[in-house]
Image: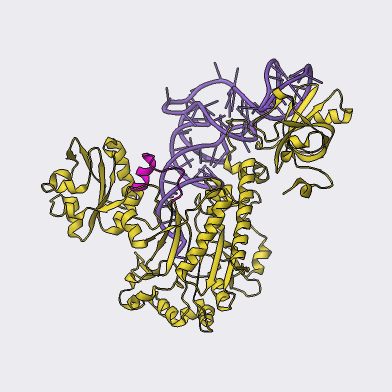
Amino acid sequence: MSDTALATTFRTHLCGSLRDEHVGASVRLGGWVHRARDLGGLVFFDLRDRAGLVQVSVDLSRATPEVAAVASSLGAETVVLVEGTVAQRPEAMRNAELSTGTIEVKATGLRVLGPAETPVIPVARGKGEQLAAEELRLRHRYLDLRRDELQRNLVLRHRLMQTTRGFLTEAGFFEIETPMLTKPTPEGARDYLVPSRVHPGEFYALPQSPQIYKQLLMVAGYDRYFQIARCFRDEDLRADRQPEFTQIDVEASFVSEDDVMRIAEGLTRALWREAGSEVPTTIRRMGYAEALERYGIDRPDLRYGLEIADLSDVFRGSEFVVTKKALDGGGRVRGIRIPGGATLSRKQVDELETVAKGAGALGLLRIKRQNGALDGPAAKFLAEGAGDRLGLSDGDLGLYVAGPDHISSPALDRVRQEVAQRMQLVPSDVNAFVWVTDFPMFERDPATGALAAVHHPFTAPNPSDLDLLESEPWRARAQAYDLVLNGTELGGGSIRINDPRVQSRIFRLLGIDEASAQSRFGFLLEALRAGAPPHGGIAFGFDRIVMMLAGATSLRDVIAFPKTTAARALFEGAPSAVPASDIAELHIRVESEHA
RNA sequence: GGGGCCGUAGCUCAGUUUGGUUAGAGCACUCGACUGUCACUCGAGAGGUCGCGGGUUCGAGCCCCGUCGGCCCCGCCA
């Protein structure tokens, strides 16, 4: 954006974009006083706007009394109008840390446009000075947002948004908005509910995602749709989870999994490029089963090895009680080999065991090879020569979990991640993208034993597994895919069911009877009966992508006005109580928690 | 719903282990000095509900109980 375009009645240029080429020019600038240095007869101050900082100097002996008075009483964060001339700085007075450091503006006019109280949290921070507490940063967000770091993040967010629009528009997608006041959904995350004034006792829900609407748009023939959609989920927060968040929501008709993945890769490539990074030309794919087998998780971090291996055979026949019990019970013994791990102390390995136990494992078996010999509680129970099949080289440590896969996989996943972090095996400059495919259609609710959709109930089964749906539903694979980067899920999607008969079968399997399906998803079933093209799509977690590309550690640093971990907005103080009359009008009653 | 950490001057923190005189420091702020600074420098000064409530004690920033707020994690997030 050129300065000419940003010139206004008040200003001719932006502070941060002045350069040597402007030397001699008369300029008018508006901005915030970043920091002032009053030397007595000479006052310097740094003036800040969205483009950056520029130094302004005021020679009090030559200034008018009015200008001199303002210059010697400048408080931080005051908004001022500066008139002056851009001048080259003397050689020795240049500041290499500023992009405007070779010049300064010699002020002839200086006026306060917006007086400012001393900021309650500092905007200008000294080198090495701590950031104010996050609570205060959120409470006084307009001050925190003035900081260069947050401005950079939000500008990047803007650019990524425009890149998304540009790329998808170019690819033939239409940006179409869907309602924010929608129908509550009984499963999935908890809904944010909005009471209806006109319909006593009835509620809207804020959308958890525009899922059904985008399918309706496909039925309606729009063929390719996208939306940068705000979504809401009333669940507890995390550093990477906000109650209201933004998805890049994409859906297309007459597509296969490959088509959606190709489009998604193109978008990802465009986004990463906009942020100055590259995505490999081909993104590898890995089946869900393989991901769980080798990494213990469906979103593996492939920046490092430490793969999980099945060592059941090595332990089979051993009288070691832990492994024997697991193997006899139909479980397995799986583990990871840590090259050079024999140097880990007893205490360190105990801490890894705590991690494994935290994930549900009963314990963490350890065997190390030192000076050729195997050492560890289970080692002496191994049959002659069996230990060699553990694949441990001298100095290695093997860590094993015995038991059923649903215990050992998550436990080994966490151990693997912990080891990688502690032993600094995670390269900082590698982007390991992977598509995880062939998710199962269903999983069992551990409490009730009932089938639940892994993805969502509109996900299409793999055509070759259609016959398994009723007989062995847990073996049926879905046409679903997740894009994973460095162990983080960037987005996920699926081919949807476009045959109403298949949709009914899935509902039945999920224990949703005809009447309930009709009342909950009737409008979708009806639409599918009206002639639905094969369609599918994907949704990306936009905030999370911005966070990664900005190098931020919290979603709050890439959202202008985020909520706290208790889902409060500290600046405006939401949520808040409302007048009793407003509540009465909505036909609802508030009960005290301790009534 | 559960676990952990944190809350002392406007801001960042020390002081809490072992209760004891008037609660400190740096930055910011106010006043004064200073014409080449860029985290300006120098001198002086002002600034405190130790988150809040209750308890123990002759005495509580410090110990105990409760509560509010923030952050991190588990559960939860089709």
Q: Is residue A416 magenta?
A: yes
Which percent across, then down, holds residue A224? 57, 71
Task: Give the residue at x 49% y 67%.
Answer: A260
On screen, A539 above or below A300? Answer: below
Nearer to us in this view, A261 or A296: A261
Q: Residue at x 31, y 49 (%)?
A: A357
Span colored in magenta? A415-432
Q: In the rendered view, would you say A54 is above or below A586?
A: above
Q: Position of residue A87 (x, y in %)?
A: 79, 30
Depicted A261 relative to depicted A253: above or below: above
> x%, y% of residue A157?
61, 52
**Res. A189 visible in picture:** no
Whether residue A119 appears in this view of the structure is: yes
The residue positioned 54% from the left and 81% from the top of the image is A527
Q: Which chain is purple in the picture?
A: B
Residue at horizontal 37%, vertical 40%? A422
Q: Chain in yellow?
A: A
Report the side of A314 relative to B67 (left or right): left
Q: Quadrant of residue A582?
A: bottom right
